[in-house]
Amino acid sequence: MNINNNTIQNSIHELESHLFHDNIFNENESHPLLLLHSQLQEIDIEPQLTTIDEKRQIISLLNYFQINYLYNFLDKYFSNIPLSILKALFDIIRFQMNINMNIDQSVTDYYFDLSLTYLTGNSTIDYLNSKKETNTNIDELFLNLFSSIGSRSVYIKTNLSYSICVSHKNIPTFFQLNSSTEHLLQSFIVYLNNLFFNNCQQYQSHNSILKWLLTMTNIYGFVPYFVKTNYPNTVLQWMMIKRDQAEHICINLWFFIINLLHNLARHRMGGKALNKLKAIDILKQWKDQYISELLLKQNNENDKDILIAYYLVYAILLEPKELKKENISNIQTVLDYILERTVQAFNSSELCFGPYNICEYLNGLAKFVVNDKFLIYIMSRDNIFNLFIEKFLLFNNIYQSTDLNTIICSSLYTIFWSISFQAEYHVKLKSIENFIQYVEQISKLESIDEHAVMMKRAAKGILFNLDLIEMDVQPIEENINVIGNNQIKLMISYAHKDATFCQKLVTSLQERFQGEIWVDFNKLSTPYEDDWEEIAKAITQCNVILMIVTENYCSSKSCRREVIHADKRNKRMIPIYLGKDYKPEDWFEIRVGSAAWVRFGDKRNHDEVMEILFKLINVQDKIKQNNNDNTFIQKLQTNAFIANNNNQTIQIPLSIDSNPVETATSSDSIPLSSNSNTLNNVTPTNPVEQWTCEEVQQWLRLPPSVLQLSSGQALSVYMNLLLHEDAQYDEYEHRMRHHGVTREQFANLISSYLSIHSNESILTELPDQWTQKEIKFWFQQNHLSNSLLNILNLMDGSQLITYAELLINSPSRIDYEFVRLQNQIGNDLFHLDEYARFLSGLKKLVKQSKL
């Protein structure tokens, strides 16, 4: 007899049609069970007659038949079997399979195929879509069993090698998107929607189905299947359910949903789909409704788990520019949890702790450290820096051995790139020889692997920030004549998210500008930002750098690196701001300072702003034609006036609201003097924060190549950054000394600033008449942290004095208040010495107010 899959399939179908008929047990030669028996016996005797693929298909057919047979048997006798007994029977079957997979992990493929056979069957799909009229208790038992077995088999697979979860290139083949699996994924949505929106109480398998979805989406390569079947939109719809309509959704169920969202978000396709649906707004609304109270309770590990899950997906989806606006007080507790779990995961042999692998904790931290406040807080924790260094050295040694190790290493490179922007870590990082060796090796790596490219980019950023890359340091004068004496080179620095505006700007410049314009999309091959050597060379060889300064620009590490590179080479920079309200971040203000700038999107139209921009560019051209003394040019630029050969000066406007570039007599210019030990011999009479950029430059008496500050407020920010001795040392050694500023001059600069601040009008007012601004100054004067100021949130001087009197007159309240403040600010950030200064200052204020 010629046996093939069709004959066996026909026998099974015929047998199923006879199930539980009255004559099913009547013996005759044509009985379908006897026919199936003889067919399988022949295959057993002569196995070579069928191929491996045919045997696999036969196994799948038999599995489905046996499941269906058991289903119909139980359905026939269901009314005679107590439900508790049935549940126990199914649990025993499930326990047996779980134990079997734990003993012999090679059977996971078999059990996954078995579960998928049932789940993709027509009968199951009909039930999931509520089209099947049957005993729902039996359907729920089978659905729960096979979704549980499926998720457990995948969980065991990923435990054997977590790399399959994170690999971006090696996609497992045990699950693929085809017509049957696509129907299953869509049917799961229908089933869960009925539970979440219609509160269908008979649906008891939601936990096992959500676990199945979690384990499947935990595999990076499978996420596109779920994106294509509309899971991003579905999950967000669940999260938009109002709390008063979702009493049946417990907090543990939300944990599954948030983690499903996290799994979708970590894939580029999933993240793009979620951001298109404005997932961040929905996520924030959900948090306000469901878990804000957890921030106050924090009763158990489950509460911690859901907070961590929320903030991990929040960090993935939130744009860096938005993450930089986050207040440390909003996230400090969760950062503590993530750091605690990171340490425990590193100490685990499986590199896991709680629901996550170490790579997921590190990925979250790598996102958070774009915010300097978060980074400083993280690095203030005991032994965190040493732990990161230890693991960095370990995983650099083995990073190519598995995809998981590569991803861990990639996250650590990103974290250390952020650390390298902090000057106080420069000496420490450069002293670790193995660290520098690994970074230098990776910076020369040639690979198209996505993670290797990220590591190389971060490595170059680290070396540059530590002043360990020597590239294109030849004097600019050697290169400026490449295109002729009457033309200059422009270089445009921008964030790639602002590419549309940049292309429009380049088009406008090309209409009138005769010199060379260097912009990456005309000069480089993609990806532009990875060719750092060419970008650095362009910065070194150009005369003027136009910087398109937006939130995208200030939040980009690559753009920040370009600004630093230009600043170190004394380049003339023209910031171009977009939008009438945008103000750059402090680090940009300190670097670029009083550079003349223009703004698009304010009062003037595009052509008017372009006219001003052309005049600013041409000012530099006139300088080059009339004076080759670079030192002389720098001194003239100090006062934002440029001399021409008619003994007149051209005043550069500081914004497009100023008059366009115009001439003035030399008597209008500010007199120049060489640097002396008294750097600040001209002091404006108005408060420092009200100083204009000209007044700042008059007081500093430093060339803009040394220090450019756009306003008195920028000067205050700069000086506040130098309150600590370590910061002063780093600023002098890595910046001022190289520009010829002596230690005495630098000391006089800081001393004079403090002297000015101490003499401002704040001390002339009675404390109970102070405004918030004056209270803030009092905190700064007493070296008290902004964290303490923000926690107290005092609105005026009368509140401050009332608070002071209540506190200092009660010894018990003094002790209680210290504990309260330390709990809110953090043990590592608020210490007894600061509290002592605080109390001492309050006592003086109370005494002063009484006088």
Image (spheres, rainbow, N blue to C red):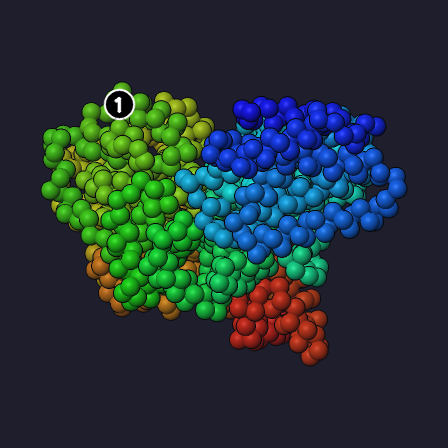
Image quadrant containing the C terminus: bottom right
In the foreground, 813 or 539:
539
Q: Residue at x 19, y 48 (%)?
A: 471
Tell me residue 147's x, y (percent): 66, 41
Tell me residue 715's x, y (percent): 40, 54
In the foreground, 686 or 1:
1
Q: Residue furthest top?
A: 511
In the rendered image, is residue 67 in sight? yes
Q: Residue 477 lies in what quarter of the image? A: top left
Tell me residue 228's x, y (percent): 55, 29
Instruction: Please say if 257 is above or below 32.
Output: below
Q: Residue furthest bottom?
A: 811
* Left or right placement of residue 238 versus residue 334 in this view: right
In the foreground, 288 or 707:
288
Image quadrant containing the N terminus: top right
Q: Looking at numbered disc 1 in the image, what kind of residue is underneath it? A: Gln
Q: Residue 392 lies in what quarter of the image? A: bottom left
Tell me residue 63's x, y (percent): 63, 36
* Left or right placement of residue 526 versus residue 373 in this view: left
Q: Residue at x 69, y 37 (%)?
A: 67
Mark 1 nearby-residue class (10 Å; few <14, some 14–19, many ≥20): few
Provide the residue designation for mark 1: 510
